[in-house]
Image (cartoon, rainbow, N blue to C red):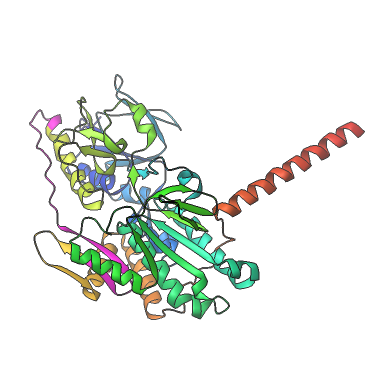
Amino acid sequence: MSTAPHVVVIGAGFGGVSATRELTKLGCRVTLVDRHPYNTFQPLLYQVATGGLNPGDVTYSLRALVAKQHRRLARFRRALVTGIDRENRQVLVDDGPPIDYDYLVVANGVTTNHFGIPGAAEYTRSMYTRRQAIEVRDTIFGAMERLAADPAAKERGFTVIVVGGGPTGVEMAGSLAEMRTYGVPVVYPEIDRDRVRVVLVEMMDHLLGPFKPDLREYTRRELEKRGVEVRTGTAIAEVRADSVDFKGGETMQADLVIWAAGIGGYSIVREWGLEIGRGGRILLEDTLLAKGEERIFGIGDCAMIETDPLPQVAPPAMQQGKHVAHNIVALAKGQPMKPFKYFDKGTMATIGRNDAVVELKGGPKFKGFPAWVAWVALHIYMLLGGRNRIQAMVSLATRYFSYPRNSVAIVGDVADTPGRKEQMAAIARAQQMEQGEEKLAEAAQQ
């Protein structure tokens, strides 16, 4: 039996995948646990939501991933983690027996943070999973089909409100605005594009907080050129089934609200007995060891060093994944662990077709077409698997060179907007009541 330490990694995002790869290189046995059988490349989910990429382009089989690891030292277990048994060193899951561990790495990411705003959880859409992106896509394109066919729908129009002025919100709003301005007149000539609105709402006074002021202003101008109604310094008071109330008293019609305003830790993690800090994130020592723990580490968005919180993006998680692997090996050998230091290479965000902003740490910043080329190249490179890279490159190139004819190429199912969702639920309840009454009538006759 192998004497190499067995490490369980919870979560197969950027941090979890990075840790798994490095741990197997160092000779550790690894069990990667995730509730999905695939890794999702979240930075490109907005492309799925707007029809630019297929869902398979941004997802990668985790069994294929572990099969490629050094000396076949990795295994995959599909399950939802429900708890941690420290005494017996076991990870408790919802399906199958517990998983024994020598060391544990928690890297299960984050979910949407609605900040307690009434109606936000019930009536908004998020884009942190493949399923959510597909739902947004089908809502948008299903709505376009209704607008093209229904005079009443044409009169009402279609309004998308994107909440959050960070990279996700900017990228989503820019892509939707280009579809509205250039794609709709070509693919849906029945629709007056002025009846389709894209509104970007940000509570702060500027977009893209981590960027320099000149790049923030450039981003705003470019979005407004594309037809986005940018509202900074605007806070949401309440979200309803068909409208949004702003603090200050204004109400705006909303057929779809996309929530990109914030993220927070999963509530279930609070039940695992780990020390939790701001935003529901696990508190860490500078070695990435969870506070008060001897064998449990945290990396990525779900965790934070309280004295040095890092941006919740891919690069810190990937660097932490590698670092935690070396610290686990050092701990297993009785050697001192090293504190984690983040090497910030810079940040980038795309605004739309041929347009992006890039800011290199301590170096130059640039915008426009060169920045967009750098953004596309980096994101394709970061995809897992050569097949996914090729598929994504072909899909994006095809869309680019045949634009705008295929800018709205995917026709979704009937739009499942919040209002329609309630309507369909009411119909289903009525049908169930009718069926129940029929059964009672049949029983009475018998």
Quarter of the image for the C terminus: give it: top right
- Left or right: 325 as drawn, with respect to 262: left
Residue range corresponding to the magenta coloring: 331-357
- The residue at the point 64 percent across, 51 percent down is 423
Quarter of the image for the N terminus: give it: top left
Quadrant of the image occupied by residue 270: top left
Q: How many marks?
A: 0
- The residue at the point 30 percent across, 72 percent down is 222
Question: Given the current orientation, which residue lies at the most extreme top position?
Answer: 87
Of 381 and 113, nearer the camera is 113
The correct choice, above or below, for 434 with respect to 61 in the image is above
Estimate the x, y position of residue 309 in percent, counting from the top left.
19, 42
- Left or right: 29 as drawn, with respect to 58: left
Quadrant of the image occupied by residue 266: top left
Q: Does 341 appear in magenta? A: yes
- The residue at the point 23 percent across, 47 percent down is 317
Of 166 and 381, nearer the camera is 166
Estimate the x, y position of residue 408 in percent, counting from the top left.
48, 72
